[in-house]
Amino acid sequence: MGERREEGEREIGETDLYLRILGGFVVLVTTEGDMIYLSDNIREYMGLTQVELMGHSIYDFTHPCDHKDIRDNLDITGVPGRSRCGGQRDFLMRMKSTVTHRGRTVNLRSAVWRVLQVCVSRPSLSCVLFTCQPLSLSHTLLHTHTFTSQHSMDMRFTYCDQRVTGFLSYHPEELLGVSVYELCHTLDLHTLTKSHQNLCSKGQSVSGVYRVLVRGGGYMWAETHSAVIAKPRPTQPHPSKPHPSKLSPPPFIACVTYILSGVKEPTQLLSLGQMN
């Protein structure tokens, strides 16, 4: 009896350690969409408790536009290779959160949408395990193998920091007006396109691993975390008809790109842009 208790405590400790390292929480969902288990640390990320969510449908707490993605990922009918992280079983989902982006706590009626990256696994025929990580750009800024950039909504560079030169050999000013798609390996265009679509519809996105081209030849493996940023409207001294210049400026995209490898195939030219 004592051995079983020690084994159970060890499993709980290992699960807690895993969730702390992960920076997220887990949800066990039936194929019909009922949440039958949630890790208790969901409260620190979403402000909601196990008691509030357990037994309810996941569709009641997620964005209606994401319900098709959820249904598709609950319908893993034993197709080989479909249930894996980093592949087809990664998707983005917006879930209600009673913790605002500024850290304030609100009631459920005033809940905001928080974007989660969800990895799907299948522990049984009747249940699916969602491992959820809230997306945030803030933690990536401290990573040494990253560079930051800003883009128009069609993904053209409007700013890039100096660190890009050490990785890709391009100077920031050379990239202004250049599309991200021009720096991507042709075989990975679908990866960035899907990420761009998620970004425009959900406000945040993680690209997945792709190859970014290096000046002079070759490529590096990379992953980009992105978010749509709305610029604040200029202050209006009088509530009269707003002047065009006082309207809200267009949003932009902020990106943090992780460099995941050294230069691969450095003598191979994959784009005419690499010759400049």
Image (cartoon, rainbow, N blue to C red):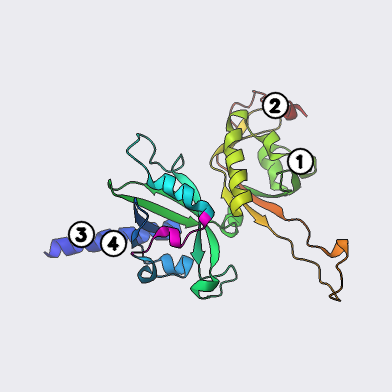
Q: Earlier in the sequence, mark 1 or mark 3?
A: 3
Residue 275 sits in quarter: top right
Name the residue beneath numbered marker 2.
271
Name the residue beneath numbered marker 1.
175
Q: Earlier in the sequence, mark 1 or mark 2?
A: 1
Name the residue beneath numbered marker 3.
7
Q: Is residue 133 left or right of residue 27?
A: right
* Amino acid at dot 2: Ser
Which region is colored magenta?
55-64
Q: Label 1 neighbourhood size at 10 Å, few (<14), some (14-19), many (20+)? A: some
Where, quadrant-wise, is the C terminus in this rendering?
Answer: top right
* Main secondary structure found in the magenta portion: loop
Mark 2 and mark 1 in contact (Cβ < 8 Å)? no
Mark 2 and mark 3 in contact (Cβ < 8 Å)? no
Mark pair 3, 2: CA separation: 56 Å
Where, quadrant-wise, is the N terminus in this rendering?
Answer: bottom left
* Amino acid at dot 3: Glu
User: Is residue 62 located in the magenta-colored stretch of the structure?
Assistant: yes
User: Residue 273 placed where, x, y %?
Assistant: 74, 29
* Amino acid at dot 1: Leu
Tell me the residue at 47%/52% (across/down): 67
> Mark number for residue 12?
4
User: Residue 78 placed where, x, y %?
Assistant: 32, 38
Q: Is residue 33 above or below residue 72?
A: below
User: Is residue 252 located in the magenta-colored stretch of the structure?
Assistant: no
Mark pair 4, 2: CA separation: 51 Å
Q: Is residue 21 visible?
A: yes
Mark pair 4, 1: CA separation: 49 Å
What kind of element bears circle 4? helix
Which mark is nearer the camera, 3 or 2? Answer: 2
